[in-house]
Image (cartoon, helix red, strand yellow):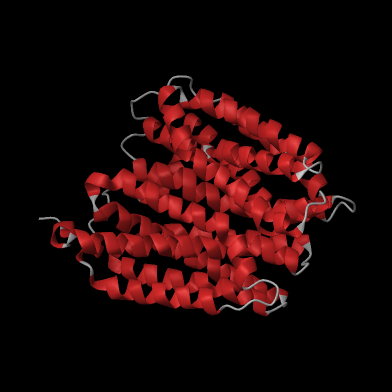
Amino acid sequence: MSHTESISPKKMISLFMVVWLGHFFVDVMLGIWPVYKSLAQIDLAQAGFIAAGGAFIGEGSQLFFGALSDRGYRNYCLLFGLAMAAAALLLAKTTSISLLFLFFMVTCLGSGCFHPSAASLVSTIRPAKRNLLMSIFAAGGGLGLAFSQLIFMSTLGEGGSMIWIGSAFFLLLFLLFYFRSTPVSSSSFPASPGQSSYSRLFAFFKVPALRSLYFSQVANQSLYWAIIFILPDALQALGHPAWICFGVGHLCFILGGVVMMVPGGLLADRYSARSLMIVLSFTGMIFFYLLLSFGAYSIWVALPLLALLGASLAILNPIAVSFGVRLAPSSPGLVSAFLMGLVWCVSEAVGPGSIGLMSSFFSDYAPIKALAVLGVLFLVQIYHTLLLPKEQVGTQLV
């Protein structure tokens, strides 16, 4: 009998909802830094360094915390991950660069601790519905990130109070603690014999198709996270009102990707993933430069372009992961870690770090000019996508 059979359906639904809300909360915490650094008028180069360092450490820690979770510490990872992510609530309480870096790094470590454990738990709640539950779980994070700046502005921003968001945090922490003894938490992922997961993960670089997928995704996700980081400042430079700069613009950009996730997957199933990735790379570049060139004319120009750009960038990663799994069908978990965790570890550091540094080289319209330069990553993305095999072979390459 599986562990899940000993849990009532009602308790399984409750457990899933608690983890979903935890995912929403953690990603809200991750989305606070881009808007807070703009409101606090922190130097963009320093803010980029903080974002790069925190993200690199946090995403890199997923490999460690994922292994720890598989060794039977999943509940502890969920609890401590949620608790550490809440360090973002302290960002608005200090102006010290050192403390800001410390709080954001702890937040990112919390994310790295929570995400692999939560995804692992969701996948074991109801194995027959794994794909559906994982999609709903992922949507929780996307919605949390999308609404993060609006939540921050209505609670912590501009003299607000952390009472409501703090109360939500403690309630979630209590509920996760309450479910800590749920039988589904038992680890049932024995270690694979032979070559270690880490060496197998980096061995993917020896496979040309997977290597091209990796670099195309690093370019894609570096652009995605650079835009999230600099968007409040860019919209200010374009002359838009505060409610657009500090919340609604970010919401449109993220929701564009969330809304198009399912249609993007359907298109990838109907047409070749490689062809769709090429089309999305070109359309993303077009929307990107249209936004920089004409986004100042009206919010009715800027907001639709933000949504279209967000969709073009965001749906590429799940399509790339699906493509990678087809190339190496016997290692789906490792391929996913290679094209998500290892990609995000680099891109979430490179994107904000590089755009923050480049902004310091310009005076007028610095965020816009820095983005225009960083747009060269679209060419890198397109180049490596064109190197992918035209036929999605079902045979194992690794």
**What x and y, as percent, mark residue 326?**
37, 31
Q: Residue at (64%, 64%) from the top-left corner?
A: 33
User: Quick check: 223 above or below 42?
Assistant: above
Q: Residue at (81%, 44%) from the top-left corner?
A: 296
Residue in front for this viewpoint, 394 or 3:
3
Q: Is residue 350 visible?
A: no
Judged left or right of residue 150, residue 180 is left
Judged left or right of residue 205, residue 372 is right
**What x and y, as percent, mark residue 252?**
62, 47
**What x and y, as percent, mark residue 118?**
37, 60
User: Quick check: 195 above or below 74?
Assistant: above
Q: Quadrant of the C terminus?
A: top left
Q: Residue at (77%, 60%) from the top-left corner?
A: 44
**What x and y, as percent, mark residue 57?**
55, 62
Q: Residue at (46%, 33%) from the top-left corner?
A: 263
Residue in front for this viewpoint, 317 or 133:
133
Judged left or right of residue 234, residue 386 is left
Q: Total number of numbered labels?
A: 0
Q: Quadrant of the N terminus?
A: bottom left
Give the residue furthest to the top.
390
Give the residue furthest to the left.
1
Q: Is residue 18 visible?
A: yes
- Residue 220, by quadrant, is top right
User: Quick check: 270 above or below 342?
Assistant: above
